[in-house]
Image (spheres, coloured by chain):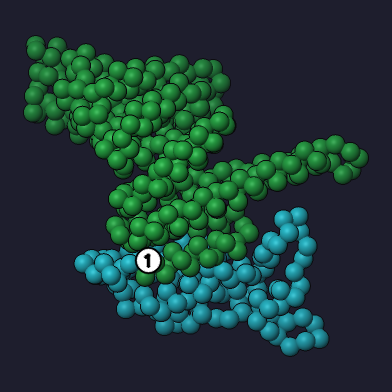
């Protein structure tokens, strides 16, 4: 069932000309593979499947380049042939949709890591050696987002044992984006650090200084005037900050003994409660409650001095 | 359900003046316009396409809301949707058809959680 569905969708994607449809198809494909779970694909098929995804990403990138070229070509010349504001908006919208499509396709790769970890060696190698270095060269927000989504999925689902010597480099790369001026990038970056804490096990110890410093950078990232003025930007800022605090909570929760809890706990408590990312807020509140019940003085202080 | 299934299976037709009605996809191939993107699919709306689209939307609601209650119809719904993921006359229908497929996998999984072979 899931096999025939996914084959059907891939076939439809090959002839699809509307980006909106491609986005819907990519999301459906992701859900089907995720729903079907482990071993939907044979080891060889994982490589074929991921190659197809890369092909779709490449085609999308080509369409963006065609749009950019078309825009450049039609900005000069006779005035009546030039693109007007409306045309430019359409092109901008088309490119935005293509970027969304690429993110959705990237999420399918993440689902492969989740459901077919054992057969993802070649895929991970390809990403690490060719695809991701190429993406990392770009400085656009969308490309950085794509890169971080993949890196986050790598640390979440593949982990240090699978990734071996490249694991610290991946973590370092994730950490390097916590000072990005884009809130969405900081959010993706701190989410990755949270995943390193949750799934990194012993490997976290050697990386904890870099991770904690990066989280501090993200939590204390200043809100400038332009962000304050725009409601949506301010909301994104707070979401990124909430996620950074939540990632710190994950360090406390999953890395007991591998980080300086005495110093971290008061700092973390001072950042709570989370006010924008309600999903993370629930997780953090539950963790605080459980930790207080288990060992009240560790959280509230020897003399309960933090009970205010 | 049977009525919706037959509505969703409707084969919309269209005719060019002077000729008899034919399958809509054949007609569209005949009158393909030239566009910037080269081979962009045409997007048209007729009463029959609208009716078909509505039926598919209803099917999706059935699958999502009834969950395993739809299990006896999975095969039939699958056949309809799989035949529509490349339906060239309507972007809406292609969108809905692809978007509905994961719901069917969930439905099968709820009905037979241990039958991995059937789900795969």
B19 vs A174, left or right, is right
Dot 1: chain letter: A
Query: How far from the left and from the top, in percent, is residue B95?
Result: 53, 62
Residue under the point 35% across and 57% down:
A43
Query: Can you say which quadrant of the picture contains the C terminus of chain A?
Result: top left
Residue drawn at the location 45% of the way across and 53% of the way down? A50
Could you tell whether B59 is left or right of A200 in the image? right
Residue A20 on image: x %, y %: 57, 54
Q: Residues within 10 Å of mark 1 (few under 14, many from 20)?
A: many
Q: Residue furthest right?
A: A78
Instruction: Determine which quarter of the picture holds residue A247.
Output: top left
- Residue under the image location 61 percent in, 79 percent down: B12
Determine which residue is flagged by label 1. A2
| The N terminus of chain A: image quadrant | bottom left
Residue displayed at 43% across by 67% down: A5
* Element type where label 1 sits in the image: helix
From what the image shows, is residue A117 above or below residue A288?
below
Task: Give above or below for A275 relative to A102.
Answer: above
Count every numbered label the image shows and give the total.
Answer: 1
The colour with which the image depicts chain B is cyan
Q: Quadrant of residue B91?
A: bottom right
Chain that is coloured green in the picture: A
In the rendered image, is residue A163 in sight? Answer: yes
Which corner quadrant of the image does residue A150 belong to? Answer: top left
Q: Would residue A275 be visible to someone looking at this image?
A: no
Q: Residue furthest bottom?
A: B20
Question: Seen in the image, is A57 located left or right of residue A217?
Answer: right
Position in image of residue B83 (x %, y %): 51, 74
Q: Which sits in the foreground, A14 or A31?
A: A14
Q: Nearer the viewer, residue A178 or A150?
A: A150
Location of residue B58 in the rendering, given as x and y in whole percent from the top left corner: 45, 70
């Amino acid at each position: 069932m899931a096999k025939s569905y996914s084959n059907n969708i891939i076939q439809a994607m090959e002839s699809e000309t509307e980006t909106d449809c491609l986005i819907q198809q990519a999301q459906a494909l992701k859900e089907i593979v995720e729903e079907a779970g482990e071993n939907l694909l044979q080891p060889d098929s994982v490589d074929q499947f991921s190659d197809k995804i890369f092909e779709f990403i490449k085609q999308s990138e080509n369409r963006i380049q065609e749009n950019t070229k078309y825009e450049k070509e039609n900005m000069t010349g006779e005035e009546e042939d030039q693109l007007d504001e409306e045309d430019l908006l359409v092109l901008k919208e088309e490119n935005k949709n293509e970027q969304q499509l690429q993110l959705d396709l990237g999420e399918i790769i993440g689902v492969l890591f989740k459901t077919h970890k054992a057969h993802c060696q070649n895929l991970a190698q390809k990403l690490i050696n060719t695809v991701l270095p190429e993406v990392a060269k770009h400085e656009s927000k969308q490309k950085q987002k794509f890169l971080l989504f993949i890196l986050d999925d790598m640390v979440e689902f593949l982990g240090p044992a699978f990734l071996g010597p490249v694991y610290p480099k991946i973590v370092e790369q994730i950490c390097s984006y916590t000072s990005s001026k884009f809130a969405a990038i900081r959010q993706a970056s701190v989410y990755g650090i949270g995943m390193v804490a949750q799934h990194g096990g012993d490997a976290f110890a050697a990386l904890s200084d870099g991770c904690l410093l990066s989280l501090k950078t993200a939590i204390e990232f200043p809100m400038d005037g332009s962000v304050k003025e725009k409601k949506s930007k301010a909301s994104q800022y707070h979401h990124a900050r909430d996620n950074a605090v939540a990632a710190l909570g994950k360090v406390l929760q999953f890395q007991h003994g591998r980080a300086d809890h005495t110093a971290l706990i008061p700092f973390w408590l001072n950042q709570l409660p989370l006010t924008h990312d309600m999903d993370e807020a629930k997780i953090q509140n539950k963790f605080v409650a459980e930790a207080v019940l288990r060992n009240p003085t560790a959280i509230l202080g020897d003399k309960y001095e933090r009970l205010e | 359900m049977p009525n919706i299934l037959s509505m969703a299976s409707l084969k919309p037709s269209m005719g060019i003046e002077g000729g008899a009605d034919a399958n809509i996809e054949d007609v569209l191939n005949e009158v393909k316009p030239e566009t910037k993107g080269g081979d962009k699919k045409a997007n048209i709306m007729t009463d029959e396409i609208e009716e078909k689209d509505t039926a598919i939307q209803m099917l999706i609601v059935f699958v999502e809301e009834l969950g395993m209650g739809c299990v006896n119809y999975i095969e039939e719904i699958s056949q309809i949707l799989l035949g529509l993921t490349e339906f060239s006359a309507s972007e809406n229908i292609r969108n809905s058809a692809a978007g509905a497929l994961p719901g069917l996998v969930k439905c099968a999984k709820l009905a037979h959680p241990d039958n991995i072979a059937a789900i795969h």
